[in-house]
Amino acid sequence: DAGVIQSPRHEVTEMGQEVTLRCKPISGHNSLFWYRQTMMRGLELLIYFNNNVPIDDSGMPEDRFSAKMPNASFSTLKIQPSEPRDSAVYFCASTTGGGQGTGELFFGEGSRLTVL
Amino acid sequence: AQKVTQAQTEISVVEKEDVTLDCVYETRDTTYYLFWYKQPPSGELVFLIRRNSFDEQNEISGRYSWNFQKSTSSFNFTITASQVVDSAVYFCALRDGGFKTIFGAGTRLFVKA
């Protein structure tokens, strides 16, 4: 089975530009997570969805960040406008949780974002 | 609020030494799940083990073992006879009774030949 698929793998953009990161979770998984990894802050949970519904977005740093999950097989994380401090590796992860949240997370390979 | 603390930022050992990575967690939930993940230099995050709050049995898998103690809110990870391939960042994570999963800061392990 295919794992979690993220695109793009690498993105270099200039400050002020819009960035869209994409994620396809593992088929059948009903929970999806977006994390950001930096040296300074480690792995931060930005937002997670259950059955396509955002459950907790308290980790989204600012209004410049938004995430959507229009269907069970696709999610986007958008940054508009981007700033140099947004440079990080963004990971998407999915899992099966049912009603009890027992599953481990399956991570994509990450999208490395560099904002100049 | 949930919290995961990995107090060891970096550990350096010589091959064949045993090493223990510490993890202390905080949660108000009675049902929760603990995990360890490995992030090798290539960058991917790899699941190692899951434990639920009702199962305090320790587990051994080859050279890896885990010690879960609710009394001290700890879930420590020991690598026996470390190898160079064990060099990675190791993350401890906590999932509450719902879906939210948070990670500790990670411990970078260097195993020297």
Image: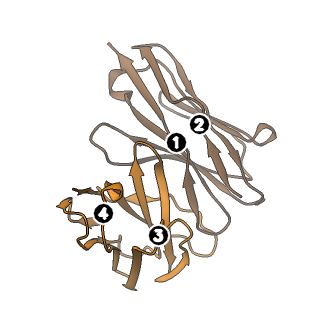
What's the residue type where badge 1 is placed? Ala
Choose top left, top right, bottom left or bottom right for residue B38.
top left
Q: Mark 4 points at which residue?
A: A3
Disc 2 to disc 1, C-alpha distance = 6 Å
Can residue A37 be seen in this snapshot?
Answer: yes
Q: Position of residue B73 (x, y in %)?
A: 74, 42
Q: Mark 2 points at which residue?
A: B6
Q: Position of residue A51 (x, y in %)?
A: 49, 82
Q: Residues within 10 Å of mark 1 (few under 14, many from 20)?
A: many
| Sequence order check, earlier mark of 2 and 1 | 2
Q: Name the residue under label 1.
A: B105
Image: B110 above or below B44: above
Q: Is residue B8 left or right of residue A67?
A: right
Instruction: State if disc 4 and disc 3 touch (CB < 8 Å).
Output: no
Nearer to me, B81 or A63: A63
Q: Name the residue under label 3.
A: A62
State the SS at label 4: loop
Q: Say whether mark 3 and mark 2 are on the same chain.
A: no
Instruction: State if disc 1 and disc 3 touch (CB < 8 Å).
Output: no
Quarter of the image for the C terminus of chain A: give it: bottom left
Chain for numbered disc 1: B
Q: Residues within 10 Å of mark 4 (few under 14, many from 20)?
A: some
For discs 4 and 2, the disc positioned in front in the rendered view: 2
